[in-house]
C-alpha cells in the first residue's frame, strides 16, 4: 500500500447502474430514449451479467474498494412492490466484491427514476421524499450485512440543473424556480432517507456524492464576488442543509471555472479544463464539516488514454497535499471503471480505466489503469 496514504485508505473506481448494466427499460431514461429525447442505452457493457469478471479486473488493478449503484427501477418496478430476485442479484454483486476483499460503497440513486415514480411527479410529488426513503431503507435492511457505506443521492445539483434548467435530461424543463424546488425536494429526500436508513441499521455510514467545482477569478472585484456567490450556491448550500444528516462528505470533482480572463488548460474530451489544483481547493473548502471525506468520483473522457495517467497522478498529488494540511480524506474513486453510457452524450465519451468494445463487449485495460495501480501499491506519484 502506498507510503503516502494510510493503510485503510479506500482506492477504487466507480460506476452507476444505468450507465453500465444494460437491459433496463422501466426508468425515465429508457422512456426518454423511446421518445427520442435522449440516446438509447440498451445493453451498454452488460455489466449486469459480467460483474464477476469485471470485479476480477478490479482486483487485478489493485483496488481495495468499489463504488456502484443500485437501480431503483429494478428493486421497485411498481410502487410498493419489491422484486426479491433483484435484491438477490445485488446481494451476489456485493458478495462478489467482499469475497475479493473489495469494500463496497453503494449508491442508492444515481440519476435514473423508476417510470412509475417519474410519471407521478418524482421527488416533486408530495410523497416523493417518503417513497424514496422507504426504498432506501428496504435496500439497506436487505443488503446491510454486505455493505456499510451508503450514498443516498448522486450529484443533486447536476441532476436538478440538467433536468430542470438545461432541458437535457428528464423531465426536460427550463425553469429556474423548478430547479430550486427540485434541489429543495432532494434535501428533504436525503434527510428522510438518512433517518430511515439509520432506523434499520444504526451502524450504516450514510452520505451523498456532491459535485463541487473549483471557482476562481481574476482581480476584478465583481468577479471575486461572483466566486463567493457560486461557492455558496453550488458547493456549500446543499451540504450545509444536510450537515446534521451525513456521516461523511462525498465529493465528485471534475470542473474548474474562472470568472474573468480565462487561463489555458489542457481539456478533456468533454471540453473540461484539467486542473488538479482545483481538487485541492475543493478539499480545503470541505474541511469545515469536520467529517471524513471521500472523493467518490474524479476522471475524464479520454478515448485514446493520452492524458489519463497524468490526470490521475496530478489529482492524487492534490489529495496528498490536502491531507498534509489536515483534510481528513479517506478514499479516492476514479470515474470510471468501464467505458459507459455518458447520459446525453450516449456512448461517445470514454471515461473507463477499462475500454469496452461495444461490438464484442470485450474489455481491454487501458495503460493508465496500471499507472493508477502502481500509485496504489507503491506510492509512486
Ligand atoms: C456523474 C456520472 C458521469 C460523470 C461524467 C458525474 O457527473 O455522476 O454519472 O458519467 O460525472 O460526466
Image (cartoon, rainbow, N blue to C red):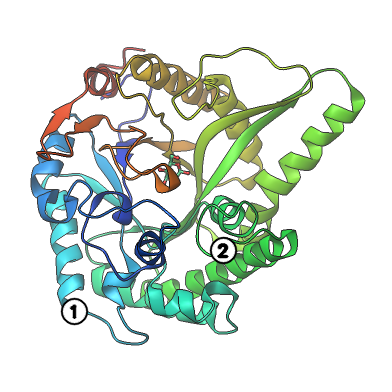
Above or below for 114 versus 245 = below
Label 1 Cα crowd, 10 Å radius (few <14 / some 14-19 / many 20+): few
The residue that appears at 86% across and 34% down in the rendered structure is 225
Q: Which mark is residue 84?
A: 1
Question: Is the residue at mark 1 in contact range of ligand 1, meaning its CB lies under 8 Å from it?
Answer: no
Q: Position of residue 192 (x, y in %)?
A: 53, 75
Above or below for 370 versus 213 = above
The residue that appears at 25% across and 68% down in the rendered structure is 143
Above or below for 62 versus 241 = above
Q: Position of residue 295 (x, y in %)?
A: 45, 38
Marks 2 and 1: which is nearer the front? 1
The residue under label 2 is: 245
Position of 326 with respect to 337 (left or right) is right
Give ligand 1's quarter of the image: top left
Q: Residue furthest right?
A: 221
The residue that appears at 20% across and 53% down in the rendered structure is 43
Tell me how far mark 2 sits from mark 1, CA to CA. Answer: 29 Å
Amino acid at each position: 500500500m502506498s507510503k503516502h496514504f494510510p493503510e485503510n485508505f479506500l482506492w477504487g473506481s466507480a460506476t452507476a447502474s444505468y450507465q453500465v448494466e444494460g437491459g433496463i427499460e422501466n426508468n425515465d431514461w429508457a422512456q426518454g430514449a423511446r421518445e427520442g429525447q435522449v440516446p438509447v442505452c440498451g445493453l451498454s457493457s452488460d455489466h449486469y451479467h459480467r460483474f464477476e469478471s469485471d470485479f476480477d479486473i478490479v482486483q487485478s488493478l489493485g483496488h481495495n474498494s468499489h463504488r456502484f449503484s443500485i437501480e431503483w427501477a429494478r428493486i421497485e418496478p411498481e410502487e410498493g412492490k419489491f422484486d426479491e430476485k433483484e435484491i438477490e442479484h445485488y446481494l451476489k454483486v456485493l458478495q462478489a466484491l467482499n469475497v475479493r476483499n473489495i469494500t463496497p460503497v453503494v449508491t442508492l440513486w444515481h440519476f435514473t427514476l423508476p417510470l412509475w415514480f417519474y410519471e407521478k411527479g418524482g421527488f416533486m410529488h408530495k410523497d416523493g421524499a417518503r417513497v424514496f426513503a422507504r426504498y432506501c431503507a428496504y435496500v439497506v435492511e436487505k443488503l446491510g450485512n454486505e455493505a456499510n457505506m451508503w450514498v443516498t443521492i448522486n450529484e443533486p445539483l447536476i441532476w436538478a440543473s440538467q433536468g430542470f434548467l438545461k432541458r437535457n435530461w428528464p423531465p426536460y424543463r427550463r425553469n429556474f424556480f423548478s430547479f430550486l424546488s427540485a434541489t429543495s425536494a432532494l434535501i428533504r429526500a436525503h434527510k428522510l432517507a438518512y433517518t430511515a436508513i439509520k432506523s434499520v441499521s444504526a451502524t450504516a455510514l450514510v452520505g451523498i456524492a456532491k459535485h463541487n467545482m473549483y471557482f476562481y477569478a481574476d482581480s476584478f472585484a465583481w468577479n471575486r464576488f461572483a466566486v463567493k456567490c457560486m461557492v455558496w450556491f453550488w458547493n456549500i448550500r446543499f451540504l450545509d442543509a444536510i450537515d446534521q444528516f451525513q456521516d461523511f462528505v462525498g465529493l465528485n470533482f471534475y470542473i474548474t471555472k474562472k470568472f474573468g480572463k480565462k487561463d489555458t488548460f489542457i481539456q478533456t474530451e468533454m471540453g473540461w479544463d484539467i486542473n488538479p489544483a482545483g481538487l485541492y481547493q475543493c478539499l480545503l473548502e470541505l474541511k469545515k464539516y469536520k467529517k471524513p471525506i471521500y472523493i467518490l468520483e474524479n476522471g475524464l473522457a479520454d478515448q485514446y488514454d493520452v492524458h489519463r495517467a497524468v490526470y490521475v497522478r496530478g489529482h492524487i498529488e492534490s489529495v496528498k497535499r490536502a491531507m498534509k494540511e489536515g483534510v481528513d480524506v479517506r478514499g479516492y474513486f476514479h470515474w470510471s471503471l468501464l467505458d459507459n453510457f455518458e447520459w446525453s452524450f450516449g456512448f461517445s465519451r470514454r471515461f473507463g480505466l477499462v475500454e469496452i468494445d461495444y461490438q464484442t463487449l470485450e474489455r481491454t485495460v487501458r495503460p493508465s489503469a496500471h499507472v493508477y495501480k502502481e500509485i496504489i501499491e507503491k506510492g509512486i506519484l
